[in-house]
Image (cartoon, rainbow, N blue to C red):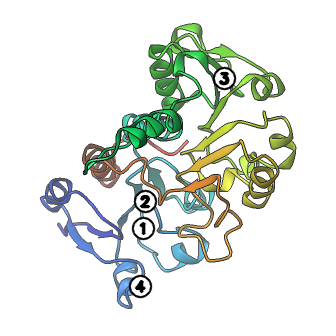
């Protein structure tokens, strides 16, 4: 019996790749390489990560494809409906990077609210005292209110950590979240959350209606000193509207790890805005998260073996 041919388009943990090779012929080829289409035509399954776009045109080149395995959480670059129409199973790793992303949220908060400075040379007593005054934090975490948009896997972890700091936590979600999963977070309508929150952290999903959820009308509800964090998806935020808001409200700040597009171009509206801090999609970049996401290959093999996958696309 012929071994299934699997195409890997981006990075995969070596241990997961070795495990898959025990049962499949695995070829790694980035989607930008000239020989990619030749491999795609033979593939029964593909393993993708962040930047491979799987749409109708892509699938037209993959007549043998049975499974798309996303080593990660977000599925906005995969046309799940078109895959289903063609009988192609889509699987992913919905909880693989929840710990990494929630930790990163608080790394950003510490950068914003509790700046640190390390000395590598002698300074005068006068400068010593000046630095202590200049770097005094305006508030402790326990004095602040956090608003969480989307109380899913990451949002719930963020709520739990924030509660440990003694923060008041509000959340807004389309779904009713049972009290035992809220970690003390209080449900709030969006206008109330935006009015009260010192910090707003975005954790909403990739459904099409969430495109530019953070827009001019949304920002009009925010406090003029709000700290806005986005570690979810770039397309949920309108960068032009946010740039205008930040310029009009110099006490506000935005710390953004995700963008639309990635990488952004020289004309990105938030470039050069002094109170916009832009990171190159680092929240899920931990060794453990990379390994966790790579083990999507187990669900890929379940599909190729005729079994039901554990984590099909919703």
Q: Nearer the viewer, residue 223 or 201?
A: 223
Which residue position is annotated with label 2?
A: 68
Q: Is residue 76 above or below residue 38?
A: above
Q: Are marks 3 and 2 in contact (CB under 8 Å)?
A: no
Q: How far is disc 1 from disc 2 in space, using C-alphas?
A: 8 Å
Looking at marks 4 and 2 on the same chain, the residue that comes earlier in the sequence is marked by 4
In the rendered structure, find residue 65 and report the number of the disc placed on it.
Answer: 1
Query: For numbered disc 3, what is the local secondary structure?
Result: strand
What residue is rendered at 47% in x and 66% in y?
51
In the rendered structure, find residue 171 and report the number of the disc placed on it.
Answer: 3
Position in image of residue 36 (x %, y %): 37, 83
Query: For numbered disc 2, what is the local secondary structure?
Result: strand
Local crowd size for mark 2, using a 10 Å CA cut-off: few (<14), some (14–19), many (≥20)? many
Horizontally, residue 200 falls left or right of residue 135, namely right
Position in image of residue 233 (x %, y %): 59, 51
Q: How far is disc 3 from disc 2 in space, using C-alphas?
A: 33 Å
């Amino acid at each position: 019996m012929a071994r299934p041919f699997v195409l890997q388009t981006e990075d995969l943990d070596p241990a997961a790749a070795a495990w898959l090779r025990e049962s499949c012929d695995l070829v790694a080829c980035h989607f930008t390489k000239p020989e990619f289409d030749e491999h795609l035509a033979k593939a029964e399954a593909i393993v993708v990560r962040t930047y491979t776009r799987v749409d109708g045109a892509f699938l037209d080149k993959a007549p043998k494809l049975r499974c798309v395995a996303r080593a990660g959480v977000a599925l906005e670059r995969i046309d799940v409906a078109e895959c289903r129409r063609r009988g192609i199973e889509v699987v992913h790793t919905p909880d693989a990077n929840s710990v990494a992303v929630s930790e990163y949220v608080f790394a950003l908060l510490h950068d914003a609210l509790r700046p640190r400075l390390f000395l590598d040379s002698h300074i005068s007593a006068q400068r010593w005292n000046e630095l202590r005054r200049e770097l005094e934090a305006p508030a402790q975490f326990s004095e602040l209110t956090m608003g969480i948009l989307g109380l899913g896997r990451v949002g719930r972890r963020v709520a739990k950590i924030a509660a440990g700091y003694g923060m008041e936590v509000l959340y807004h979600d389309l779904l009713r979240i049972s009290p035992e999963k809220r970690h003390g977070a209080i449900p709030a309508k969006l206008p109330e959350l935006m009015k009260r929150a010192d910090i707003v952290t975005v954790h909403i999903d990739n459904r099409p209606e969430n495109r530019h959820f953070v827009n001019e009308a949304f920002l009009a509800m925010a406090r003029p000193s709000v700290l806005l964090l986005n570690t979810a998806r770039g397309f949920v935020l309108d960068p032009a509207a946010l740039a205008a808001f930040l310029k009009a409200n110099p006490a506000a700040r935005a710390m953004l790890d995700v963008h639309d597009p990635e990488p952004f171009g020289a004309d990105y509206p938030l470039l050069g805005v002094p109170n916009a801090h832009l990171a190159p999609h680092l929240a899920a970049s931990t060794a453990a998260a990379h390994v966790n996401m790579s083990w999507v290959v187990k669900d890929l093999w379940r599909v190729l073996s005729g079994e039901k996958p554990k984590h099909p696309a919703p």
